[in-house]
Amino acid sequence: SQQGEEDPQALSIQEGENATMNCSYKTSINNLQWYRQNSGRGLVHLILIRSNEREKHSGRLRVTLDTSKKSSSLLITASRAADTASYFCATDEVFGAGTILRVKS
Amino acid sequence: EAGVAQSPRYKIIEKRQSVAFWCNPISGHATLYWYQQILGQGPKLLIQFQNNGVVDDSQLPKDRFSAERLKGVDSTLKIQPAKLEDSAVYLCASSPGTDTGKLFFGSGTQLSVL
């Protein structure tokens, strides 16, 4: 079974816009991670946020975690065509179904 | 630092045949994972090893899937016999420690069962 559920399933934006993806999970967690997967490739780790953290930044990425709502969000600012990929949240090695992001140039 | 190596990259077999996938994790990584990713879905954990011991194989279909990690380094995942629904990408990942943390993924093996 999958712990995380991403929303939306697919997102299409213009280059330069911001992209926000959400993840909800069911049980208590130690940490939550976000990964990116380009078509036909393995997953690449983006960012990890621990259960006692509320927000974390890495370059153009901003992740928030609300343990009371069992949800997290990933914000990609000033998106680029190269950001086109699938994005997954994972809790304790269990992955959600992912959000497909398409950035149009 | 070399990444997680997987082979073969692609495999096409007939149903009821056998197939094996190989994974060499990043040197020194104690934990190794095998995931199955069906098209359009997220990766599903099949089995987790800590060194050469199994930590979690609750979602491994043991009637047809088997995995081993001899000497706590590289690992093989086998399917025997394969079914049409086994068509998927099989991803191997490794991580340094026992606590849940960053996973490093290989490029995967794309299996097509005809």
Image (tube, rainbow, N blue to C red):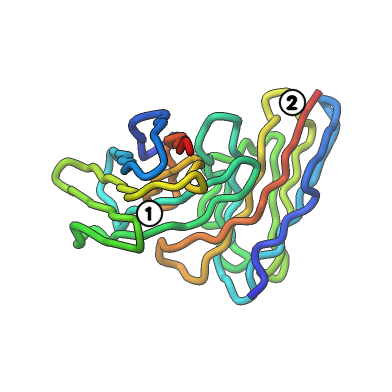
**Amino acid on which the number 1 mark rests in the picture:** Gln
Q: Is residue A55 left or right of residue B16?
A: left
Q: Where is residue B77? Give x, y as percent.
A: 72, 49
Q: Is residue A24 above or below residue B23?
A: above
Q: Is residue A74 left or right of residue B49?
A: left
The residue tagged 1 is A33
Question: What is the secondary structure assignment of the residue under circle 2?
Answer: loop
Q: Which mark is residue A7?
A: none
Residue displayed at 16% across by 41% down = A69
**Relative image position of residue A17 (x, y in whole percent):** 33, 41
Which numbered dot is residue B83? Answer: 2
Residue B114: x %, y % from top left: 81, 23
> B50 or A72, which is in the foreground?
A72
Q: CA distance from mark 2 to mark 1?
A: 32 Å
Q: Nearer the viewer, residue A5 or A3?
A: A5
Residue A26 seen in the current view = yes
Instruction: Identify the residue at image location x=63%, y=53%.
Output: B92
The answer to which of B90 and A105 lies nearer the viewer is A105
Mark 2: amino acid = Lys
Can residue A23 be seen? Answer: no
Judge whether A18 appears above or below B68 on screen: above
Q: Position of residue B76 (x, y in %)?
A: 74, 54
Question: Which quadrant is the N terminus of chain A positioned in?
Answer: top left
Query: Is residue B9 positioned above or below B54 on the image?
Result: above
Q: Residue at x 69, y 40 (%)?
A: B65
Location of residue A93 with respect to B101 vertically, above or below: above
